[in-house]
Amino acid sequence: MKKSISTAMSRENIARVMEILTTTPQTLATLSQDFTPQTQSQPLRTGDRSFIELVAHILNCDDRTTECIYEALLLKEPLFANIHVEREWGKLLRYEQFEAAELLAYFRVRRTALVRVLNELTPAQWGRVIREEGKERKESVYWRARGQALHEAEHLSQIATRFGTVKPSSA
């Protein structure tokens, strides 16, 4: 997917990130209607993840990104642990074992909380940073939120393309 939201933090770019982050839970819920309980756990295509596995993956990534954003807002340049989102975090939480409706409800609540926090940020707060183990570069709240939004948009597009129905927000 083309990364069409600039890495430059601006009011317009923040608005585009916020639009994707805000609409993703509803877009996922709408896309879930294309699946029966039986097809939710079947790969979208041979070699692909299933709908449930994709939602679990989005949740794993959202968990880590949200935690990182909150730490950046609460602490001065916190050191964020380098925990792999799938091999470690996902293996611990096993979201893929939940029903789609449960995952979507959980995601909606978590995302509502994140969006409320992000909607209140000043430009200086969007620029707050974290350090991550093993990385030289510091990453801002904007950088992390942008990355999550683009990642979600890519997966929403992947699901929508499979059915040719709902078109998620374009990044």
Image (tube, rainbow, N blue to C red):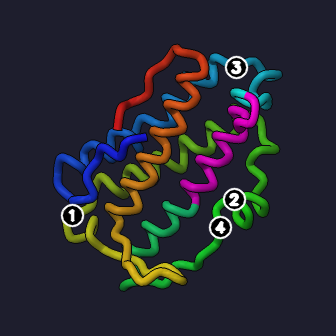
Quadrant in the picture for residue 125: bottom left
Callout 1: few (<14), some (14-19), or many (20+) C-alpha neighbours within 10 Å?
few
Residue position for label 4: 84
In depth, the one of 41 and 109 nearer the eye is 41
Quadrant in the picture for residue 36: top right
Q: Amino acid at mark 4?
A: His
**Residues at marks 4 and 1 touching, judged by CB atoms closer than 8 Å:** no
Q: CA distance from mark 1 to mark 3?
A: 40 Å
**Residues at marks 2 and 4 touching, judged by CB atoms closer than 8 Å:** yes
Q: Amino acid at mark 3?
A: Phe
- Classify 3 as above or below 136: above
Q: Give the mark nearer the N terminus: 4 vs 1.
A: 4
Magenta stretch, main secondary structure, is helix
Q: Which residues are magenta?
A: 46-63
Residue position for label 3: 35
Magenta highlight on residue 81 = no
Extreme residue toward the left, this view = 11
For residue 68, side relative to residue 98 (left or right): left
Q: CA distance from mark 3 to mark 4?
A: 29 Å
Q: Amino acid at mark 2?
A: Glu
- Classify 125 as above or below 159: below
Residue position for label 1: 122
